[in-house]
């Protein structure tokens, strides 16, 4: 610990250690998603996913045609939807109901809860995901992947959310603002030897076992992996403190299968398997 501006950080954001970490994370993300330096910029932005998406939209004019539906799509539509906008926007995976959306025609893609489980949407011009969900790092950095030729269309609104600032600083492995330094080092650790196939297989296996157990006791499932959105039969009890409760979805629970330990999955399976089933 030194006499840095932020007392709980082990270094500062203009240090060589920070720059090396920044550049290593960029390299790892390129390898995981197979993004060439000729086609894609990889920006590491110290803000949450919603604010990063806001930054992308504001950098390219401030208005989009929202092509998908769902809670997160509606949040963007309330502020930025314009049926005559030059760019289309979509959410790849709507977590409120675990639904994979059609984003095949979308220029700007919210992939915050979709990557790296799903395929990278290569037709897009800008894609956003985060460090703290599927990658499991500390909160929170956004990973903003932008096609390099898309910058020709830049039309930023006034303000500090213009991603051109982050692009300029990224060339030297820095950010224009003070970031969560330890969270970036956490992401670097998570990306070491990250095996995407192993990651996907683990989630798919969890989904198969847990969904079969829920359906086996007469419960309901909607959507698909990587989140399990389920509702148990009336009167069934399970430790609900483990799960996310979607807003406004009475009785539904969600297990985000990139989180939780294997022992917690096994304990959930045991609880479900102990629920008595009704005779047909």
Image (spheres, rainbow, N blue to C red):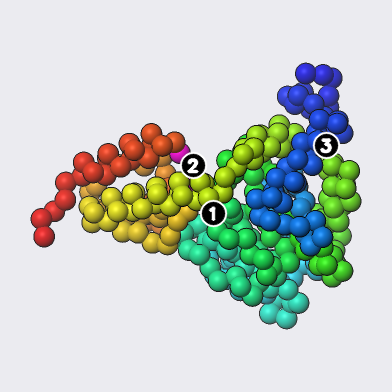
Residue 148 picture location, percent across and down: 82, 63
Closer-to-camera residue (67/226)? 226
Q: In which quarter of the image is the C terminus?
A: bottom left
Q: Disc 3 or 2, which lies upstream in sequence?
A: 3
What span is colored magenta in the figure?
A: 256-260
Residue 230 picture location, percent across and down: 36, 54
Give the spatial CA distance, label 2 vs label 1. Answer: 13 Å
Q: Which mark is residue 117?
A: 1
Closer-to-camera residue (235/131)? 131
Visible in this render: residue 222? yes
Closer-to-camera residue (172/81)? 172
Residue named by callout 3: 19
Q: Disc 3 or 1, which lies upstream in sequence?
A: 3
Give the spatial CA distance, label 3 vs label 1. Answer: 28 Å
* Residue name at image x 83 percent, y 67 percent: 149
Residue 240 picture location, percent across and down: 36, 42
SS at circle 2: loop
Residue 247 as seen in the image, left or right of residue 107: left
- Give the number of the mark in front: 3 or 2: 3
Q: How crowded is mark 2: few (under 14 residues within 10 Å), some or many (20 or more)?
A: some
* Residue name at image x 86 percent, y 56 percent: 164
Residue 257 among magenta residues: yes
């Amino acid at each position: 610990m030194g006499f840095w501006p932020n007392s709980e950080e082990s270094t500062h954001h203009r240090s060589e250690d920070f720059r090396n970490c920044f550049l290593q994370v960029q390299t790892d993300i390129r390898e995981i998603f197979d993004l060439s330096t000729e086609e894609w910029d990889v920006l590491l932005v110290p803000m949450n996913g919603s604010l990063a998406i806001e930054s992308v939209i504001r950098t390219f004019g401030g208005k989009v045609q929202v092509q998908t539906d769902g809670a997160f799509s509606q949040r963007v539509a309330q502020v930025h939807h314009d049926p005559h906008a030059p760019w289309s926007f979509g959410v790849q995976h709507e977590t409120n109901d675990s639904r994979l959306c059609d984003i095949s025609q979308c220029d700007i893609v919210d992939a915050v809860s979709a990557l790296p489980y799903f395929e990278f949407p290569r037709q897009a011009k800008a894609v956003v995901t985060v460090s703290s969900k599927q990658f499991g790092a500390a909160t929170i950095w956004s990973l903003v992947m932008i096609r390099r030729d898309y910058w020709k269309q830049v039309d930023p609104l006034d303000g500090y959310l213009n991603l051109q600032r982050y692009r300029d600083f990224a060339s030297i492995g820095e950010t224009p603002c003070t970031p969560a330094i330890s969270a970036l080092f956490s992401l670097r650790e998570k990306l070491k030897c990250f095996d995407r196939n192993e990651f996907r297989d683990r989630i798919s296996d969890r989904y198969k076992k847990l969904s079969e157990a829920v359906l086996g006791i007469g419960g309901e499932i909607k959507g698909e992996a990587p989140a399990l959105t389920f509702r148990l039969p009336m009167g069934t009890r399970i430790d609900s403190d483990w799960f996310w409760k979607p807003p406004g979805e009475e009785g539904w629970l969600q297990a985000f299968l990139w989180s939780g330990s294997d022992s917690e999955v096994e304990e959930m399976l045991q609880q479900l398997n102990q629920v008595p089933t009704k005779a047909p």
